[in-house]
Image: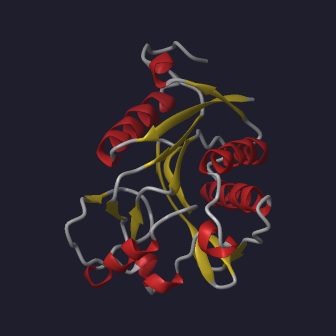
Amino acid sequence: MSGVFLDLGRIEYGAALELQRSLAARRAKGEVPDLLMLLEHDHVITLGRKTSPENFKPQGVPVYQVERGGDATYHGPGQLVGYPIVMLENHDVRKHVRNIEEALMRAVRRYDIQGERMDGHPGLWVRGKKLASVGVAVTNWVTYHGFALNINTDLSYFNLIRPCGLDPTTMTSMERLTGDKAPFGEVKESVRAEFSSVSGRDFARRNVESLAAPGNVK
């Protein structure tokens, strides 16, 4: 089974959100195939459906209330954000979340980082520290939103929130775990390859313009 990989580089959150919603609607109509969007955002805080006021302290960073599950989180430079837009033919959202976690575990293992799951807390964990967050939304059984992997992220920005209701010091990054900056582009390609393998789809690189016309990509 094939899909499309969109490498969007660094993109403002609102533009990426609008693109996600548009492509998810088109995926539900069968106008585009399954998609994997990988990118970076400028500094931004997003509030999921479960965000409570005590977990959020706005201080000069753009804020978006969104449809995904979970609580408040931060996105910014040095963090790899992934938005799989995938038709769940089996309607198994939990399996989709586990596929994301498995792909991330395999990707960071290449850098001698042993990630694991934690019951009740979706994402990727390393020795009690959270390396990646996962929060998805589903419309017409098409997934959107997704995950954020801290590669060379400035973790001080998590002090603006209680990430997923946790203490900000719970967050970690590949850079902090290894003591060196990780090769961002290389990690991005590893995540693309591992998500392709885990999901059983070959997400091949295309540009977003190739999806402009309905029915242009099958």
Residue situated in front as seen by the camera: 186 or 164: 186
Image quadrant containing the C terminus: top right
Residue at the spot x=72%, y=61% of the render? 108
Residue 1 drawn above or below residue 20 = above
Residue 212: x percent and y percent? 42, 17
Decide which of 85, 196 is in the foreground and name it.
Answer: 196
Residue 183 horizontal side relative to residue 77, left or right: right
Q: Residue at x 65, y 67 (%)?
A: 180
The x, y position of residue 123, in whole percent, is 60, 68
Residue 50, x across and y down, in percent? 37, 72
Q: Is residue 122 visible?
A: no
Quadrant occupied by the N terminus: top right
What's the residue at 70%, 47% (across, down)?
A: 195
What's the colour scheme? secondary structure
Q: Residue furthest left?
A: 60
Work out whether residue 8 can be spotted: yes
Image coordinates of residue 93 in percent, x first then y, are 60, 56
Q: Examine the rendered structure and indicate whether residue 82 appears above or below residue 170.
A: above
Horizontal placement of 162 versus 123: left or right? left
